[in-house]
Amino acid sequence: LVVWKLDRLGRSLSHLLSIVTSLRDKQVAFRSLTEGMDTTTASGELLFHVFGALAQYERALIQERVVAGLAAARRRGRIGGRPQAITGEKLDAIVAALNDGMSKAAVCRNFGVKRTTLIETLARVGRQGYGRVADDP
Protein backbone atom coordinates (compact mmCIF):
# COMPACT_ATOMS: atom_id res chain seq x y z
CA LEU A 1 0.00 0.00 0.00
CA VAL A 2 1.44 3.37 -1.00
CA VAL A 3 0.22 6.65 0.48
CA TRP A 4 1.34 10.19 -0.21
CA LYS A 5 1.63 11.21 3.45
CA LEU A 6 1.31 9.27 6.69
CA ASP A 7 -1.28 11.56 8.28
CA ARG A 8 -3.66 10.83 5.38
CA LEU A 9 -3.86 7.20 6.48
CA GLY A 10 -5.01 7.59 10.09
CA ARG A 11 -5.86 10.11 12.80
CA SER A 12 -3.99 8.67 15.76
CA LEU A 13 -0.93 6.56 16.36
CA SER A 14 -3.05 3.67 17.63
CA HIS A 15 -5.20 3.84 14.47
CA LEU A 16 -2.11 3.91 12.25
CA LEU A 17 -0.60 0.97 14.13
CA SER A 18 -3.77 -1.08 13.78
CA ILE A 19 -3.90 -0.38 10.05
CA VAL A 20 -0.27 -1.33 9.51
CA THR A 21 -0.67 -4.45 11.69
CA SER A 22 -3.69 -5.47 9.65
CA LEU A 23 -1.74 -4.89 6.44
CA ARG A 24 1.20 -6.90 7.76
CA ASP A 25 -1.14 -9.79 8.72
CA LYS A 26 -2.33 -9.81 5.11
CA GLN A 27 1.29 -9.66 3.90
CA VAL A 28 0.83 -6.17 2.43
CA ALA A 29 3.78 -3.78 2.61
CA PHE A 30 3.27 -0.11 3.45
CA ARG A 31 5.14 2.87 1.98
CA SER A 32 4.75 6.57 2.55
CA LEU A 33 6.16 8.64 -0.30
CA THR A 34 6.54 11.96 1.54
CA GLU A 35 8.25 10.56 4.63
CA GLY A 36 10.17 7.95 2.65
CA MET A 37 9.33 5.05 4.93
CA ASP A 38 8.89 1.40 4.20
CA THR A 39 7.55 -0.78 7.03
CA THR A 40 9.19 -3.90 5.65
CA THR A 41 12.49 -2.79 7.24
CA ALA A 42 13.34 -2.25 10.91
CA SER A 43 14.36 1.36 10.31
CA GLY A 44 11.17 1.97 8.35
CA GLU A 45 9.12 0.55 11.22
CA LEU A 46 10.88 2.88 13.69
CA LEU A 47 10.38 5.85 11.38
CA PHE A 48 6.71 4.92 11.06
CA HIS A 49 6.24 5.03 14.85
CA VAL A 50 8.08 8.34 15.18
CA PHE A 51 6.18 10.06 12.36
CA GLY A 52 2.88 8.62 13.58
CA ALA A 53 3.46 9.99 17.07
CA LEU A 54 4.48 13.39 15.68
CA ALA A 55 1.39 13.53 13.45
CA GLN A 56 -0.85 12.72 16.42
CA TYR A 57 0.90 15.40 18.50
CA GLU A 58 0.48 17.97 15.73
CA ARG A 59 -3.27 17.23 15.45
CA ALA A 60 -3.62 17.62 19.23
CA LEU A 61 -1.87 21.00 19.11
CA ILE A 62 -4.12 22.19 16.29
CA GLN A 63 -7.21 21.08 18.22
CA GLU A 64 -6.03 22.93 21.34
CA ARG A 65 -5.48 26.12 19.33
CA VAL A 66 -8.92 25.89 17.73
CA VAL A 67 -10.64 25.37 21.09
CA ALA A 68 -8.68 28.26 22.65
CA GLY A 69 -9.51 30.54 19.71
CA LEU A 70 -13.24 29.75 19.91
CA ALA A 71 -13.23 30.34 23.68
CA ALA A 72 -11.46 33.69 23.23
CA ALA A 73 -13.99 34.73 20.57
CA ARG A 74 -16.88 33.80 22.89
CA ARG A 75 -15.34 35.91 25.67
CA ARG A 76 -15.21 38.84 23.23
CA GLY A 77 -18.91 38.33 22.54
CA ARG A 78 -18.60 36.71 19.12
CA ILE A 79 -21.03 33.94 18.39
CA GLY A 80 -20.31 31.61 15.52
CA GLY A 81 -22.72 30.50 12.87
CA ARG A 82 -25.33 32.14 10.76
CA PRO A 83 -27.56 34.87 12.25
CA GLN A 84 -31.00 33.65 13.30
CA ALA A 85 -33.57 34.19 10.52
CA ILE A 86 -36.59 34.62 12.80
CA THR A 87 -36.23 36.47 16.10
CA GLY A 88 -37.93 38.94 18.41
CA GLU A 89 -41.37 40.30 17.60
CA LYS A 90 -41.62 38.37 14.34
CA LEU A 91 -41.00 35.12 16.22
CA ASP A 92 -43.59 36.04 18.85
CA ALA A 93 -46.14 36.81 16.12
CA ILE A 94 -45.42 33.52 14.32
CA VAL A 95 -45.78 31.47 17.51
CA ALA A 96 -49.04 33.29 18.34
CA ALA A 97 -50.39 32.64 14.83
CA LEU A 98 -49.53 28.95 15.05
CA ASN A 99 -51.11 28.66 18.49
CA ASP A 100 -54.24 30.37 17.13
CA GLY A 101 -54.56 27.57 14.58
CA MET A 102 -52.87 28.98 11.49
CA SER A 103 -51.16 26.27 9.42
CA LYS A 104 -47.42 26.30 8.91
CA ALA A 105 -47.96 26.84 5.18
CA ALA A 106 -50.10 29.92 5.87
CA VAL A 107 -47.55 31.24 8.37
CA CYS A 108 -44.80 30.86 5.77
CA ARG A 109 -46.85 32.77 3.19
CA ASN A 110 -47.97 35.52 5.59
CA PHE A 111 -44.57 36.11 7.22
CA GLY A 112 -42.40 35.49 4.15
CA VAL A 113 -40.32 32.64 5.56
CA LYS A 114 -39.40 29.30 4.07
CA ARG A 115 -40.92 26.17 5.60
CA THR A 116 -37.51 24.73 6.50
CA THR A 117 -36.56 27.95 8.30
CA LEU A 118 -39.85 27.90 10.21
CA ILE A 119 -39.46 24.26 11.28
CA GLU A 120 -35.83 24.74 12.36
CA THR A 121 -36.74 27.89 14.30
CA LEU A 122 -39.64 26.16 16.04
CA ALA A 123 -37.33 23.31 17.04
CA ARG A 124 -34.82 25.83 18.42
CA VAL A 125 -37.31 27.93 20.39
CA GLY A 126 -39.17 24.90 21.69
CA ARG A 127 -36.17 24.34 23.95
CA GLN A 128 -36.09 27.98 25.04
CA GLY A 129 -39.39 28.22 26.87
CA TYR A 130 -41.84 29.33 24.17
CA GLY A 131 -44.10 26.54 25.30
CA ARG A 132 -45.94 24.18 23.06
CA VAL A 133 -46.47 25.34 19.50
CA ALA A 134 -49.58 23.96 17.86
CA ASP A 135 -48.99 21.42 15.08
CA ASP A 136 -50.68 21.56 11.70
CA PRO A 137 -54.26 20.28 11.87
Image (cartoon, helix red, strand yellow):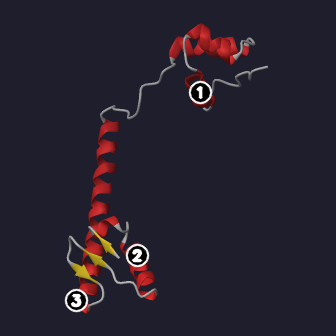
- Residue type at the position of mark 1: Val
- Residue 64 point in image, percent of width and height: 31, 56
Figure label count = 3
Which is in the foreground here, disc 3 or disc 2?
3
Which residue is denoted by mark 3 in the rendering? 43
Corner quadrant of residue 32: bottom left
Corner quadrant of residue 11: bottom left
SS for callout 3: helix
The quadrant the C terminus occupies is: top right
Q: Is residue 40 left or right of residue 92?
A: left
The mark that comes first in sequence, 3 or 2, is 2
Work out how far the residue at label 1 is from the one at label 2, CA to CA, in angstroms: 42 Å
Q: Give residue 125's mark.
A: 1
Which residue does the image show at 58% across and 26% down from the upper left? Answer: 116
- Residue type at the position of mark 3: Ser
Which residue does the image show at 75% across and 13% down from the upper left? Answer: 101
Work out how far the residue at label 1 is from the one at label 3, CA to CA, in angstroms: 59 Å
SS for callout 1: helix
